[in-house]
Amino acid sequence: MTTNKDRALEACRLLSERDLDTMFAAFAEDGTWTMPYLPDRFAFAGERDKTAMRELLDGFLGGFEHFEFHVEQAVADGDTVAILGKSYGIGPRSAIYRNTYHLFFTYRDGVLLKVRELFDPYQVEAYVAQVEAQAA
């Protein structure tokens, strides 16, 4: 029997492979993805529906020549799965991206309903600045 922990680990594998079609096929139509930061200070902050989050990830991940997401720990409690992970990517003109993540997946009847994603926003800003500086 597939558990919610199995489903969350599979979502992370699909993210690492940038197989967003398959990843979002397992996401509820009324699902949300939240990055709980101040929107006036971080462009990617806020809650997004399935379509908006797919567009954001297409744009962000699409710029990478290479991207990996590694799960370091996964803990399940009922409908919630907590993931501790790390990413590494090589973007345009060899810009390097690294970050650590805490992801909280919430399932409803085996379907992904909510993702709450916590990471270091300064690492994202440093990567974007690196890409922009190299383009200049």
Image (cartoon, grey):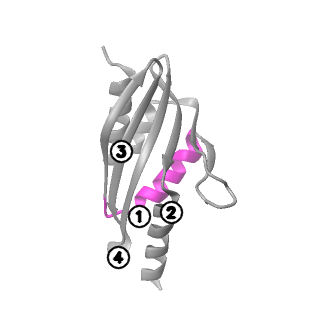
Q: Are the residues flagged by discs 1 and 2 in contact, CB closer than 8 Å? A: no
Earlier sequence position, callout 4 versus callout 3: 3
Quadrant housing residue 47:
top right
Q: Which mark is residue 63?
A: 1
Earlier sequence position, callout 2 versus callout 3: 3
Tell me which amino acid carries mark 1.
Gly
Q: Position of residue 38 (x, y in %)?
A: 66, 54
Tell me which amino acid carries mark 2.
Tyr
Quarter of the picture containing the N terminus is top left
Quadrant housing residue 2:
top left
| Residue 39 vertical position relative to residue 126 in the rendered view, above or below | above
Q: Position of residue 51 (x, y in %)?
A: 57, 43
Between 112 and 37, the one lying in front of the other is: 37
Is disc 2 placed on a helix, strand or loop? Answer: helix
Between 103 and 92, the one lying in front of the other is: 103
| Residue 132 included in the magenta stretch of the image | no
Q: Position of residue 29 (x, y in %)?
A: 57, 30
Earlier sequence position, callout 1 versus callout 3: 1
Tell me which amino acid carries mark 4.
Arg
Earlier sequence position, callout 2 versus callout 4: 4
Write the start and end of the magenta stretch as one range: 50-66
Is disc 4 placed on a helix, strand or loop? Answer: helix
Q: Residue at x 53, y 53 (%)?
A: 56
Mark 2 or 4: the one toward you: 2
| Residue 105 vertical position relative to residue 98 in the rendered view, above or below | above
Mark 1 or 3: the one toward you: 3
Q: Which mark is residue 85?
A: 3
Q: With 136 as the anchor, is 75 left or right in this view?
A: left
Inter-mark Cα distance, 1 to 4: 10 Å
Q: Which mark is residue 93?
A: 4
The answer to whether residue 22 of the structure is visible from this angle is no
Tell me which amino acid carries mark 3.
Gly
